[in-house]
Image (spheres, rainbow, N blue to C red):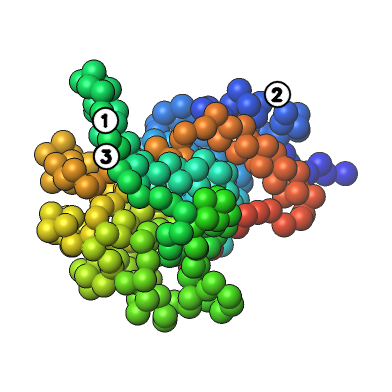
């Protein structure tokens, strides 16, 4: 009788403390910490979790993993990986969709409240030890109207949190319904909203979806909130709109590029609030949730069952 060879896994050592005690014993697990170690670890590996801070190194590691059948990642957006490799090799990809959804949704509310109440100026006054006699921001979320583009795991958590503040939320999605605009309708309605919130994936369809025309159609006191990707906004057009005070402001968790260079004009605009892509990191449970999801998926994979959530490289999300 011939025995079945063990599943071979190549996994970043960053997640090792959470995974190793719970992994089945009959696996061939190769841990790596550096890009060079990863290039060796992936040879012959069937399962991979290649997350690194260097996204270019992740892409190179994927190209070197010629026997890979399943790739896992903590990232929700994987647009930096070579989609052609994933498609040509028919690799199943599970991503981090939903792992950070709670904290990102909370960040949206925080950013909106920060701008509505002028809280950045309150913090600055505290640093100067100056007692303000009036609020620098007088907007209320209650009764305002928000347009929410993107109704995935994050969007579905943003909506109820804003409704708890009595914000009238309109969602953009392909399926029509009450409180819903379709992809062909929202641009004609932009002038009706106080907040325009971007929670869409980065795909060719969404690239520069907010440009000069869209910004011109927004209300002069409207605020753009982007927790999607920098690429979904035409950044030069946004800078022009903010400089001219064509819109009231922008809360940007994402920019192009990242990190934003120190001499970039966005830093100089007082109506641009830049949170440095920290929304998903403002928690302590990201790696715990990711490890548990991977272990659950590993059991399903070995049993021949479907894993998830599945990232489709043809769609880009």
Query: For this rendering, which residue is in front, 151 or 120?
Result: 120
The nearer-to-camera label among 3 and 1 is 1
Residue 97 coordinates in the image, percent (x, y) = 55, 51
Query: For this rendering, which residue is in front, 247 or 16?
Result: 247
Q: Quadrant of the N terminus?
A: top right
Residue labelled with disc 1: 133
Mark 3 → mark 1, Cα distance in angstroms = 9 Å
Q: Secondary structure at mark 2?
A: helix
Residue 133 coordinates in the image, percent (x, y) = 26, 30
Q: Which mark is residue 136?
A: 3
Mark 3 → mark 2, Cα distance in angstroms = 52 Å
Query: For this rendering, which residue is in front, 228 or 82?
Result: 228
Residue labelled with disc 2: 21
Q: Residues within 10 Å of mark 1 (few under 14, many from 20)?
A: few
Task: State yes or no: discs 1 and 2 in contact (Cβ < 8 Å).
Answer: no
Q: Secondary structure at mark 3?
A: loop
Please state if 79 lies on the left or on the right of 65 as rendered: left
């Amino acid at each position: 009788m011939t025995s079945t060879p063990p599943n071979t896994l190549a996994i970043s050592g960053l997640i090792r403390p959470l995974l190793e005690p719970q992994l089945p014993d009959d696996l061939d697990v190769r841990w790596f910490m550096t890009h060079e170690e990863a290039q060796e670890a992936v040879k012959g590996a069937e399962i991979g979790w290649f997350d690194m801070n260097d996204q270019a190194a992740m892409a190179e590691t994927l190209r070197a993993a010629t026997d890979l059948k399943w790739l896992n990642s903590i990232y929700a957006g994987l647009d930096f990986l070579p989609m052609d490799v994933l498609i040509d090799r028919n690799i199943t990809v599970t991503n981090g969709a939903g792992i950070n959804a709670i904290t990102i949704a909370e960040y949206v509310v925080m950013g909106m409240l920060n701008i509505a109440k002028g809280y950045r100026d309150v913090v600055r006054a505290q640093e100067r030890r100056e007692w303000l006699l009036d609020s620098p921001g007088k907007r209320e979320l209650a009764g305002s109207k928000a347009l929410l583009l993107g109704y995935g795991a994050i969007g579905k958590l943003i909506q109820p949190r804003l409704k708890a503040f009595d914000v009238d939320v309109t969602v953009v999605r392909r399926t029509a319904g009450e409180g819903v605009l379709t992809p062909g309708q929202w641009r004609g309605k932009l002038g009706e909203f106080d907040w325009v919130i971007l929670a869409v994936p980065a795909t060719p369809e969404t690239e520069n979806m907010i440009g000069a025309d869209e910004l011109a159609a927004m209300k002069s006191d409207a605020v753009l909130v982007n927790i999607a990707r920098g690429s979904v906004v035409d950044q030069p057009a946004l800078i022009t709109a903010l400089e001219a005070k064509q819109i009231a402001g922008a809360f940007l968790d994402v920019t192009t590029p990242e990190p934003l260079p120190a001499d970039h004009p966005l830093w100089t605009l007082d109506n641009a609030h830049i949170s440095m892509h920290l929304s998903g990191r403002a928690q302590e449970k990201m790696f715990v949730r990711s490890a548990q999801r991977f272990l659950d998926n590993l059991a399903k994979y070995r049993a021949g069952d479907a894993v998830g959530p599945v990232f489709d490289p043809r769609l880009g999300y």
